[in-house]
Image (cartoon, helix red, strand yellow):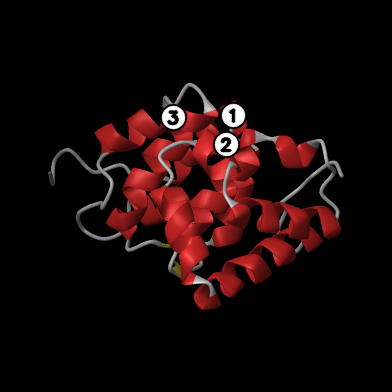
Amino acid sequence: MTQPFKSGSPLTGALLAWWRSLENNRGDRAELRRCADLLQVMQTEAFHLARARLIAAGLSAEESRSPRLAAIVALAAHVTAQSDASLPGAFSSGDKAPVSPLRFRQILDAVDDDELFTRLRRVLPLIDDSVSLAALAADVWYWGDRVRRRWVYDYRWPDKQSA
């Protein structure tokens, strides 16, 4: 599989189905939400259930060992509602952005997968845990300079004159 988590892909469908199943398995959701880092996520049964579903949908065994998959699974457990909003769009919506420019820059500066996970986990409550799960998964999976640049342009930077 060369491009996991693209919109409409079988992997995205499998992730969404697994996420919906968390409604009936609140213990798994709670366990994932308590994880402080990606190693803890990888030690949960819920992660391995999600991983097995994604492998069945076409994710290679090698790709399924990526710490980014652990980040996607754990962050998905924090999402309580689907929306059409991309992450940077949700971070900067409304008159006063839920995620300040300083905090947004800190997310962009994440140096590794654990740091990205931690920073995203901390801002999800600021946007009412509502985001496009497909966009979240794709952005975390492909995190790098290209995603960072897109986020910089998708974030609605405040006008200093009105601030």
Above or below, 140 relative to 45: above
Q: Earlier in the sequence, mark 3 or mark 1?
A: 3
**Mark 2: secondary structure:** helix
Query: Label 3 is placed on what type of residue?
Result: Glu
Res 32 seen here: yes
Residue 35: x and y in percent read 43, 45
Mark 2 sits on what residue? 147
Mark 1 sits on what residue? 144
**Mark 3: secondary structure:** helix
Mark 3 sits on what residue? 115
Q: Kindly indicate whether the residue at mark 1 contacts the one at mark 2 (C-beta within 8 angstroms).
A: yes
Above or below, 118 relative to 95: above
Q: Earlier in the sequence, mark 3 or mark 2?
A: 3
Above or below, 111 relative to 98: above
Q: Quadrant of residue 145?
A: top right
Q: Nearer the viewer, residue 125 or 146?
A: 125
Residue 115: x and y in percent read 44, 29
Q: Nearer the viewer, residue 103 or 59?
A: 59
What is the crowding at mark 2: few (fewer than 14 residues within 10 Å), some, or many (at least 20)?
some
Name the residue located 46 percent from the left edge and 36 percent from the top edge. Answer: 37
